[in-house]
């Protein structure tokens, strides 16, 4: 059946309205393109991943243990059915220099069958001290030829336990099939808890006694594509098989580790016991000390009370003393006055006496002369005595004592005999002696009075001294008392020093 | 056996809750080579009958026998074949393909039909020899209708169905078209069925079928049809 007309109709219609036709064509093409593209992108990405993983021989399973894997574990892994490759490896976390980046460091050996790296620049590390860095954004700060130092700001971890050397030279920039995202590099045991980049060093640069992980690949998963149900099912099977293979290992390792650990534990327990003992002792000391403290506090309180009462008493005493001192002062003043009066009296008396003496002593001397003369005369006959002497004697006797005068006169006349004259003369002398004795007595009395006065003055002086001492002491004590009072409130440095200088009551 | 027999044919249209019965028990017969006219007022169901006869619609009930085959039982693939091979349809409003020339329009039909006539010749026969390479937009109404008729004729169908072919034409052009149809019927022995609501044309037909209100009211045979030139209206 020819359809020429039909076709020519179609083409002519299109040609006639080509703009519209092309617009509609483009619109539909866009829609279909979007749909097809989006539908295809998913499978395409999975396909790309599949090729990448197959080319780089990514592992199927990674086995890790909290205690690491030793040779026995690796041997058991190799026994798992259908296993193709088992690759034990080391890994560790560290900070890179002072960049603040946390790196997950993997061990590398040129003959590793799994997890091959894609070298973007440079080459893989060959000798100790060489390192290859992640080709990611964060790793781009390191270039081939840079030197990196592994650091860890935490003082408790020693990187030397994990790594043989801490200085590395960057020889390559690599990509790993384990990390297809540009960001996450897994969890880390240091720092903020996530790793920023990964790094690869030769396996001889790790110093660990056990492997940290083992990578495994299987024969029947080699052809399957990742992210498919078939692959996941196979992996589940293999995971179970691996877990079963290593099922007995935890117990065995535990036993090994336990023996080691027990010794340490016992040691530590001993330390704890010792420490506990020390603690108990210390507690005891503490209680004792507390008791003493309470006691001391009570004593202090008592002391304070006592101080207060004593201070009050002392103050009362001081006040009494002050009053006494005042009284004493007054008495002293009175006594001084008395003394002064006495002194004056004494002086007056002495003057009087001296006056009297001045008048009496010549008279006494005259008297004695008279007596002497009289006595002389008495032995003589009155007619033998010269007239002048007679009149002199008479006058003298008369002035001295009328009785005597009479006697003399009498004698002279012959009325009185010599014995009576002697008697009169001796009694006159006696009288004189009496007077002289009186004078001497008076003088003695005066002297005695003077001595008394002096004694009195001495006493007074002593009393004054004593009073002054007492006053000084009182002053000191009252100052001390105020110091004590002052100490209980606010005490200035100077006052404190002054108080310190005083002695206790 | 009549060439076309419609027996108890029903066609209903369901519009929501209402049912419109377009054909309510149609029964008619048409002999081979007859020029039949179906008359009736608008909305009587005439076009529905023609559409069913032409394979463009399916009856809900009844039998439609064309040349001893019940086309009411046809599936859509069979109907397509029936339409392509056995039916030529002339529409009231021409329905020509505007992008194709007259010749190509006729070729459209002749190329899909197994016993087609030469398109150019048919066009000359209808009197459009000068207009072979003109587009329908460049033709008058009558010329366009003639192209449509040429298209229908080029297939040499068993049935030539015309749905009010002169509806859009003036008196003279209409007469011309009807003349063409009559001549085709006489000369080639094609069974021609024309729908019209012009009852003055009754004398030119061999059979007149009156359809009114979804039913065939009257079917009359005309033993002496006259040429359409002789009819004035």
Image (spheres, rainbow, N blue to C red):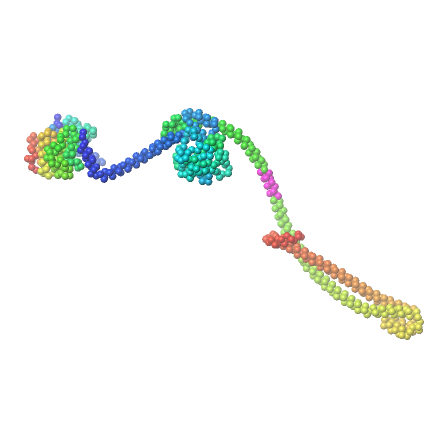
Give the residue at x 48% y 30%: A210
Q: Is residue A218 left or right of residue B132?
A: right
Where residue B48 sits in the image (x, y, percent)?
Answer: 16, 33
Instruction: Give the magenta part as a residue range.
Output: A279-292
Would you say residue A395 is visible in this rendering?
A: yes
Give residue A263's quadrant in the image.
top right
Please state which of residues A125 and B3 is positioned toward the viewer in this rendering.
A125
Give residue A351's quadrant in the image.
bottom right
Whether A458 is drawn above or below B55: the answer is: below
Where residue A342 sits in the image (x, y, percent)?
Answer: 75, 64
Q: Quadrant of the C terminus of chain B?
A: top left
Where residue B89 sits in the image (x, y, percent)?
Answer: 15, 33
Give residue A33's quadrant in the image.
top left
Please state which of residues A346 and B181 is positioned toward the viewer in this rendering.
B181
Would you say residue A64 is visible in this rendering?
A: no
Q: Is residue A190 magenta?
A: no
Q: Quadrant of the N terminus of chain B?
A: top left
Q: Main secondary structure of the magenta part?
A: helix
Q: Is residue A281 magenta?
A: yes
Where residue A431 sits in the image (x, y, percent)?
Answer: 86, 67
Q: How many marks?
A: 0
Give the residue at x 7% y 30%: B223
Please state which of residues A165 and B175 is positioned toward the viewer in this rendering.
A165
């Amino acid at each position: 059946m020819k359809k020429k007309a039909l076709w020519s109709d179609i083409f002519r219609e299109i040609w006639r309205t080509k703009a519209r036709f092309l617009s509609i064509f483009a619109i539909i093409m866009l829609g279909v393109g979007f749909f097809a593209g989006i539908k295809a992108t998913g499978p395409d990405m999975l396909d790309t991943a599949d090729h990448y993983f197959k080319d780089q021989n990514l592992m199927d399973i990674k086995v890790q243990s909290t205690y690491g894997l030793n040779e026995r574990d690796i041997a058991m892994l190799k026994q798992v059915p259908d296993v193709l490759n088992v690759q034990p490896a080391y890994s560790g976390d560290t900070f890179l220099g002072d960049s603040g980046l946390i790196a997950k460091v993997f061990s590398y050996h040129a003959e590793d069958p799994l997890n091959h790296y894609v070298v973007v620049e440079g080459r893989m590390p060959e000798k100790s001290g060489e390192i290859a860095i992640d080709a990611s954004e964060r790793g781009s700060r390191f270039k081939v030829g840079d030197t990196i130092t592994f650091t860890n700001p935490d003082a408790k971890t020693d990187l030397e336990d994990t790594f043989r050397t801490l200085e590395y030279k960057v020889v390559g920039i690599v990509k790993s099939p384990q990390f297809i995202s540009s960001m996450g590099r897994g969890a880390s045991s240091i720092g903020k808890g996530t790793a920023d980049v990964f790094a690869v060093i030769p396996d001889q640069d790790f110093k660990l006694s056990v492997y940290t992980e083992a990578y495994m690949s299987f024969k029947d998963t080699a052809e399957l594509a990742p992210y498919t149900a078939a692959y996941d099912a196979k992996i589940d099977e293999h995971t179970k098989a691996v877990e079963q293979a290593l099922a007995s290992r935890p117990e065995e390792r535990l036993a090994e580790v336990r023996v080691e650990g027990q010794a340490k534990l016992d040691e530590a327990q001993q330390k704890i016991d010792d420490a506990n003992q020390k603690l108990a002792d210390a507690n005891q000391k503490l209680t004792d000390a507390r008791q003493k403290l309470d006691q001391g506090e009570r004593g202090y309180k008592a002391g304070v009370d006592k101080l207060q009462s004593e201070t009050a008493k002392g103050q009362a005493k001081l006040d009494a003393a002050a009053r006494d001192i005042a009284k004493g002062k007054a008495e002293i003043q009175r006594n001084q006055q008395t003394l002064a009066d006495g002194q004056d009296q004494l002086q007056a008396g002495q003057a009087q006496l001296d006056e009297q003496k001045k008048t009496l002593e010549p008279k006494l001397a005259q008297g004695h002369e008279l007596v002497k003369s009289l006595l002389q005369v008495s032995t003589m006959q009155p007619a033998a005595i010269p007239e002048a002497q007679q009149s002199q004697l008479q006058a003298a006797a008369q002035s001295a004592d009328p009785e005597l005068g009479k006697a003399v006169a009498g004698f002279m006349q012959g009325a009185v005999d010599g014995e009576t004259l002697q008697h009169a003369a001796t009694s006159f002398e006696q009288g004189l002696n009496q007077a002289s004795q009186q004078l001497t007595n008076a003088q003695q009395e005066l002297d005695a009075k003077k001595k008394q006065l002096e004694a009195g003055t001495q006493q007074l002086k002593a009393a004054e001294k004593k009073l002054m001492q007492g006053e000084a002491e009182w002053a000191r004590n009252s100052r001390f008392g105020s110091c004590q009072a002052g100490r209980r409130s606010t005490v200035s440095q100077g006052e404190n020093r002054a108080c310190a200088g005083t002695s206790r009551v | 056996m009549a060439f076309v027999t419609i027996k108890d044919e029903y066609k209903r249209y369901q519009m929501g809750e209402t049912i419109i019965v377009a054909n309510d028990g149609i029964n008619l017969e048409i002999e081979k080579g007859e020029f039949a006219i179906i008359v009736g007022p608008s909305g009587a169901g005439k076009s529905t009958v023609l559409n069913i006869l032409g394979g463009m619609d399916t009856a809900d009930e009844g039998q439609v026998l064309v040349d001893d085959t019940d086309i009411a039982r046809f599936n859509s693939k069979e109907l397509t074949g029936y339409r392509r091979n056995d039916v030529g349809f002339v529409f009231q409003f021409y329905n020509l393909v505007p992008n194709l020339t007259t010749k190509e329009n006729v070729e459209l039909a002749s190329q899909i039909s197994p016993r087609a006539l030469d398109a150019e010749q048919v066009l000359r026969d209808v009197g459009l020899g000068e207009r072979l390479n003109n587009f329908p937009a460049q033709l008058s109404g009558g010329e366009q209708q003639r192209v449509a008729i040429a298209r229908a004729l080029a297939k040499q169908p068993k049935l030539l169905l015309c749905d009010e072919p002169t509806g859009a034409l003036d008196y003279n052009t209409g007469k011309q078209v009807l003349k063409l149809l009559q001549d085709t019927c006489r000369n080639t022995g094609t069974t021609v069925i024309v729908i019209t609501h012009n009852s003055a044309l009754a004398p030119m037909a061999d059979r007149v079928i009156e359809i009114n209100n979804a039913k065939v009211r009257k079917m009359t045979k005309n033993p002496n049809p006259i040429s359409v030139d002789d009819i004035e209206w």
